[in-house]
Image (cartoon, helix red, strand yellow):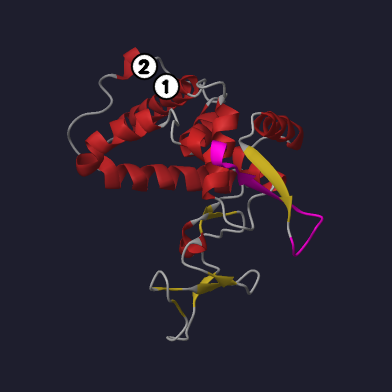
Amino acid sequence: MFLQQAVLASRNQTVMPITDLSHAVTDGPVSGTVPGEKNAIAQRVIVLLDRLGRLTRELQFADGLNPAQWEALRFLAQANRYSRSPTALADYLGATKGTVSQTLIALESKGLITRCKKTEDRRQVDLCLTEAGQAMLAKDPMQTLEQATLEIADELGAEMVKGLSRLLHDLQTRNQINEFGVCQDCSLFCVNSQAALVDMNAKVGVGTCGNTGETVDAAEKTKICVNYKTAN
């Protein structure tokens, strides 16, 4: 999803053909490059993101699902209790509510998700994966990309994460797009000050959501949240 968001933002720019940019990236450090070289590197990054986005999209026409349906399944598997709603999903995918509604209808008809009324607010819908949905994710075609990434993780992994995260954050800020992110990395997440308040099963301290005031357990704090705010 992060790559696709970056690609969407880049498609409004004029991009040089990839064959014209083979000289742009060398084995040396990028720092200290002249403006022309920096522009060439930036253009190269845009082209690579676009090509990766197109490739990963094609991979996701698999097992009777399309890319939007696969992304919805992934999101619901990773989202916390505040975020498993049609509205949050539409926000995360950058799609209209109508488009997301059609995606959810298709997933429901395939028996991959179910809709439940939240007990605390019966007007809200909680989207959950069924056992069939969980089994489908085990066949996620994006595992191909994950395997390819693992092969370069030791050499480039940390720098790739740092660079892509910075690029994504910048694009989201410029376009006023909701960031989403893991609960425990959120500026609103508070580690509970009571040393005795510990999840006795997982042996991991719990925290509190600064937005709702509710307790966040060990499992929830590692999930994606629609209320995520980057720490300053």
In this rendering, the count of numbered labels is 2
| Residue tagged 2 | 18
Q: Which residues are magenta?
A: 119-132
Is the Cβ of the residue at disc 2 closer than 8 Å to that at disc 1? yes
Q: Is residue 103 left or right of residue 184?
A: right
Of the pair 173 and 142, the residue shown nearer to us: 142
Residue 124 among magenta residues:
yes
Question: Label 2 vs label 1: CA separation?
Answer: 10 Å
| SS at mark 2 in the image | helix
Q: Amino acid at mark 2?
A: Ile
Type of amino acid under label 1: Arg
Dot 2 surroundings within 10 Å: few (below 14), some, or many (20 or more)? some
**For the point 72% across and 32% down, which residue is it?**
105
Q: Which residue is at 62% across, 72% downward?
A: 214
Foreground label between 2 and 1: 1
Q: Residue furthest right?
A: 123
* Residue identified by numbered label 1: 51
